Image (cartoon, helix red, strand yellow):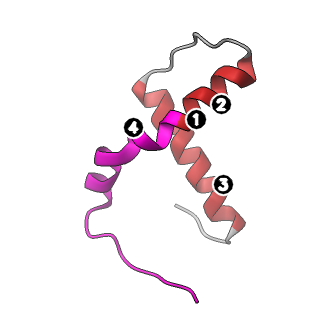
Amino acid sequence: MLMFSKIADPVKLWECHWVHLTDVLLHATRYQVGNLEIQLSSAELQNLALLEIERILNRNERSL
């Protein structure tokens, strides 16, 4: 069963939840570069999250 719905305010959704979406990405990046102390800016973290969302959507023949 497929479910689709529209998000009323995608910008508000992003602003409220991007930090939660990037927690795992920050840890993964730290391990990938071999530096557990590395810090990324908010913009860098948001870009990583958007790239990951785009990768997931592409696997399902979708795109941002």
Earlier-in-chain disc, 4 versus 1: 4
**Element type at marker 3?**
helix
- Where is residue 20? Give x, y as percent: 42, 41
What amino acid type is highlighted by mark number 4?
Val
Label 2 sits on residue: 28
Label 3 sits on residue: 55
**Element type at marker 4?**
helix
**54 relative position to 23: left or right:** right
Q: Residue at x 39, y 43 (%)?
A: 18
Q: CA distance from mark 4 to mark 1?
A: 10 Å
Instruction: Find out whether residue 13 is within the magenta segment.
Output: yes
Label 1 sits on residue: 25
Q: CA distance from mark 4 to mark 2?
A: 15 Å
What amino acid type is highlighted by mark number 3?
Arg
Looking at the rendering, the stretch of residues picked out in magenta corresponds to 1-23
Q: Is residue 62 above or below residue 37?
A: below
Q: Residue furthest bottom?
A: 1
Q: Residue at x 59, y 45 (%)?
A: 51
- Where is residue 17? Give x, y as percent: 35, 47
| Residue density around tag 4, few if under 14, some if 14–19, many if 20 or more, within 10 Å | some
